[in-house]
Image (cartoon, helix red, strand yellow):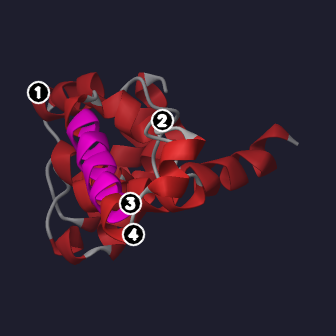
Amino acid sequence: MNKNEFKQSIALVAEYYSKTLTDGLVAVYFDNVSDLPIEVFDLLLKKHIASEQGKFWPTFSHLLEQAGTESDEATRAGIEFDKNTGIDGTGHFDRNQETQFKTAERRKRYIKSQQLAWKKTTPAEKLATSILLPYVAQSLKGIES
């Protein structure tokens, strides 16, 4: 996004929260979100306002939480494992021979490994794998036409 788009979006939010925007505040926010498409930034702001934290001015970390949390990552990883129990590299033969307990243990390990990997990712990478992607893609369809 460019700085003018950002200023328009953040000005509306500042008005909503009766917050005075200083040049320093604008600069800090823009540095943290400038890599995002404006549509994603706007969507994060909307989700923040509608969330439990929406009664407070959005910090950058609050906005990132709208893209997904560690718990969301655990859910995604669990679903991923359930769809393909070999996703962790366990071979077909071994999967067929193991007990339900062993499968459940592998599932837990896989989820934990995905959560650890998620914690190490940058904000941009978190957004790239975000649960928001379907919504962003949908909102971009109208813009591309």
Local packing at callout 4 (Cα closer than 10 Å; few below 14, some 14-19, many 20+) is few
**10 Å neighbourhood of mark 3: few (<14), some, or many (≥20)?**
some
The mark that comes first in sequence, 2 or 1, is 1
Q: Which residue is mark 1?
A: 24
Three-letter amino acid code of the residue under disc 2: Ala
Answer with the quarter of the image where residue 16 lies: bottom left
Residue receiving disc 4 = 100
Indicate which disc, 1 or 3, sits on the residue closer to the N terminus: 1
Looking at the rendered image, the disc whose residue lies closer to the viewer, 1 or 3, is: 3
In x, y percent, where is residue 60?
Answer: 20, 43
What is the secondary structure assignment of the residue under circle 3? Answer: helix
Residue carrying label 2:
128
Q: Which mark is residue 103?
A: 3
Q: Quadrant of the C terminus?
A: top right
Labels 2, 4: front one: 4
Q: Residues within 10 Å of mark 1 (few under 14, many from 20)?
A: few
**Residue 139 at x, y percent in the picture:** 68, 53
Give, as a three-letter code, the residue at label 1: Gly
Rendered image quadrant of residue 120: top left
Say which residue appears at 43% left-offset and 44% top-offset: 41
Spatial CA distance of label 3 from label 4 is 5 Å
